[in-house]
Every structure is written in structure tokens, then in C-alpha cells.
Amino acid sequence: MGDIRIWEETDGRSTTLGKIVALANPESPSDYFIQVNPAYSFLEREIFEWIESHLLKKKKTPNKKEKLRIHTIEGNSARELLLSELGYMKGEISMYLRMRPIGLPIPDVECPEGFEIRSVKGRSDYDQLASVTRLVFGHGEWFNAEIYEGITRCSFYKQDLDLIAVAPDGTFASFCTFRMDPISRITNLEPVGTHPTYRKLGLGKALIFEGLTRAMSYNPALLYVGAANTPAANQLYDSVGYTEKLAEYCWFKEI
């Protein structure tokens, strides 16, 4: 948790009021995302300076340069100007923030013959689900049943929105989860993946449409997915209606 930094509103006497106005959180020790309430954008210089100083303190080899990466969505010209002033260089698109219109119809798509779409049942599914997740995303052995069980205890988790497609032999062939923030009802499609043996069968699309149908019963305020900038991902998310998109760029600096 020491790599995550929260900024809170105060009353002017250094007493926190509990209102979080900004957050810096890492994907890895040198990859950072920031979330800032627009009314507190003046904090961004302080945020970037904290990230840099934090990374410098954690460097194992003080004299060796490391590349720090800051991820930010396109369209924030003030932030981009600040990053340039601080010595960051704009890289390529790292991913897309894709959104699906709430009112867009959800078609009925049948699961391929012999496959079953169902909710994750609980602890009995976690080992196999963690295993296929490692296979699809290249996660190390650290991503295990215990980690998955921890995810299910998060406030965004709803068991009926955690879906798998099961092959005729019982193999977990594909999976997807819709994570809904309980306060804002903003709903993130994360993760989505299909076992290499079962790709190009339409399983991912069938799962997503089933998940969307279920998610609508919770009256989501926004549907989005953070999507890789690859031909396969672009084709899939375009086909299921996540067509509104903003590019996310990686800004980097050696420190």
C-alpha cells in the first residue's frame, strides 16, 4: 500500500475531512496512473513530483536510470503541458478507454453447442479460474485461488456478473467479469479472456452479451472497458458495442 498515495481535502488546519480528491496508484513500481477531481487539478504537479521522489527512494541502484511511465487519457491539454514541462516524453497509445452506450440494444447470442455459460460458483472454481487467467495473461504463479478469492471480497464484485464458459469436458474455456462500483454504478468489463484452444468460436462475445444483459438489471450509469490496442481486442470490442473510445498514452521520463 506504500506505493499508493491519496490526497484528501482539509479544513486548512491539516485535519482531513475524508474527501478523497486525488489518487496515484501503480500498475507496477514504475508505471503510474493518477485520478484527480477536476476541481483539484492544481495538485497534479505535486502528484507527479511525489511519484518521482517515491521511485527514487525505492531504487535499488541509485545511480542507474529507470524509466518512469505515467498513463493518461487523451484530451487533457493542461496535464500534457505539465508533463512536458516536467521533462516527460509522449509515447505511443498504450490502450483505449472504450465505452458502450447504455441504450444500445443487446442481441441474443447463443453459446456454441456443447458449451455452458454460468456464474462462477465460488471457492470450488477459483483454482481452475486462476489457472486459465495465468495462461491467458501470462501472470505468474502469484495469481492463485487465494488472490481470486480476495477479488471476490471487493465492493465492486457481484457473483452473477462473474461469468465463465465451460467446455464439454469441463475445461474453463472463456471468462469475463463486470465490476460495478456500488456508489457511482460505473461498470467496468474486466477481465475478459479465452483459453487459446477455444478462440475464434464466439465464446468471448457470447459471454459479454450475457454479462451485459445481467448488468442492466443493476441500472449501470456507465459501461466501459480498458482495452489493449491490438487488432484482436479492437475487433472484439467493436463487435459488442464498445465503440466510443479515448486513447490512453504513456508518457515517460528517465530518472
Image (cartoon, rainbow, N blue to C red):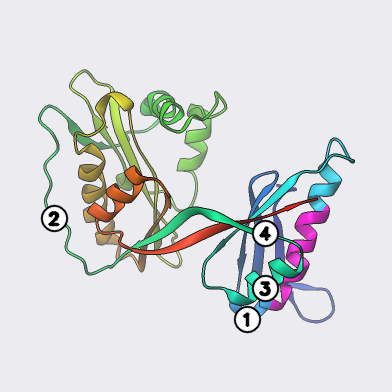
User: What amino acid is labelled 4 in the image?
Assistant: Met
The reply to whether the C-beta atoms of the residues labelled 1 and 3 are less than 8 Å apart is: no
Query: Which residue in the structure is indicated by mark 4?
Result: 89
The reply to whether the C-beta atoms of the residues labelled 4 and 1 are less than 8 Å apart is: no
Question: What's the distance in space between the residues labelled 2 and 1, CA to CA?
Answer: 40 Å
Question: What's the distance in space between the residues labelled 1 and 3, CA to CA?
Answer: 18 Å
- Is tag 2's residue or tag 1's residue first in the polypeptide sequence? 1
User: What amino acid is labelled 3 in the image?
Assistant: Leu
Query: Which residue in the structure is indicated by mark 1?
Result: 39
In the image, 225: left or right of 73? left
Range drawn in magenta: 42-53
Q: Residue at x 45, y 33 (%)?
A: 137
Q: Position of residue 52 (x, y in %)?
A: 79, 55
Q: Element at badge 4?
A: strand
Q: Element at badge 3?
A: helix
Query: Which of the 4 image quarters holds residue 140?
Result: top right
Query: Which of the 4 image quarters holds residue 50?
Result: bottom right
In the image, 195: left or right of 143? left
Which of 170/56 is in front? 56
Q: Element at badge 1?
A: helix
Query: Which residue in the structure is indicated by mark 2?
Result: 107
- Is tag 1's residue or tag 3's residue first in the polypeptide sequence? 1
Query: Which residue in the structure is indicated by mark 3?
Result: 81
